Image (cartoon, rainbow, N blue to C red):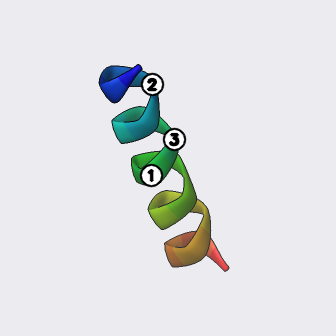
Amino acid sequence: MGLITGIWVLFCMLKDAIN
């Protein structure tokens, strides 16, 4: 569960950086 959350947070940060 923690790993999935960490990946999701990284994905959101990456998407935010692209935008």
Name the amino acid type tagged 1. Answer: Val
Name the amino acid type tagged 2. Answer: Ile
Q: Secondary structure at mark 3?
A: helix
Write the residue at 32% across / 23% down.
Answer: 3
| Disc 3 to disc 1: CB gap under 8 Å | yes
Q: How far across and how far down the image is residue 4, in percent?
A: 45, 24
Q: Is residue 19 left or right of residue 8?
A: right
Q: Label 3 belongs to which residue?
A: 8
Q: Which numbered disc covers residue 4?
A: 2
Name the amino acid type tagged 3. Answer: Trp
Write the residue at 40% across / 50% down.
Answer: 10
The residue lying toward the viewer, choosing from 5 and 15, is: 5
Q: Label 1 belongs to which residue?
A: 9
- Using the numbered discs, state the Cα–Cα distance from disc 3 to disc 1 in whole angstroms: 4 Å
Task: Tell me the crowding category of disc 3: few under 14, some 14 to 19, or many 20 or more residues within 10 angstroms, Cα based.
Answer: few
Q: How far across and how far down the image is residue 5, in percent?
A: 44, 36
Name above or below for residue 19 compared with residue 6.
Answer: below
Earlier in the chain: of badge 1 and badge 2, it is: 2
| Disc 1 to disc 2: CB gap under 8 Å | no
Write the residue at 61% across / 62% down.
Answer: 15
